[in-house]
Amino acid sequence: MHSPKTLLIAQAIISFSMALMMTGFFALLELGVTTEWLHAWARHFVVAWPLAFCLSLVVGKMAFSLAVGLTARR
């Protein structure tokens, strides 16, 4: 298993990437490629990343436990 520091850094990188891509994608669908889209993307990302990071701390442990259970040899 990885060190807690490595897991925390990985969760920060993953939540950053996912929040960036998801907020950009959905703002693009709503507004099209405009300057308003870029502003909306930035506003949504500022809220989404901290939320995604906090949720990943909770969900990450459950997901790893579930994955280990599903892949355990019987």
Image: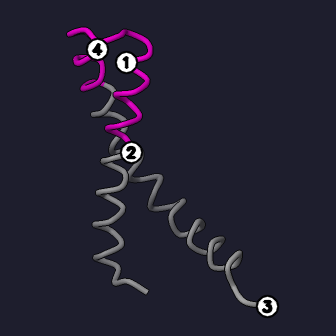
The quarter of the image holding the N terminus is bottom left
Q: Label 2 vs label 4: CA separation?
A: 18 Å
Q: Where is residue 18 shown, x and y percent of the image? A: 38, 45
Above or below, comparing residue 67 to residue 17 in the picture:
below
Residue annotated with mark 3: 74
* Label 2 secondary element: helix
Residue 24: which quarter of the image? Answer: top left
Q: Amino acid at mark 4?
A: Trp
Q: CB of mark 3 within 8 Å of CB of mark 4?
A: no
Which residue is rendered at x = 41% and y = 34% of the image?
A: 22
- Residues rendered magenta in the picture: 18-43
Q: CB of mark 2 within 8 Å of CB of mark 4?
A: no
Which of labels 3 and 4 is toward the front?
3
Q: Residues within 10 Å of mark 4 (few under 14, many from 20)?
A: some
Which residue is rendered at x = 32% and y = 65% of the image?
A: 10
Q: Residues within 10 Å of mark 1 (few under 14, many from 20)?
A: some
Q: Label 1 vs label 4: CA separation?
A: 6 Å
* Label 3 secondary element: loop
Residue annotated with mark 4: 37
The quarter of the image holding the C terminus is bottom right
Which residue is rendered at x = 36% and y = 61% of the image?
A: 11
Above or below, comparing residue 16 to residue 34 in the picture:
below
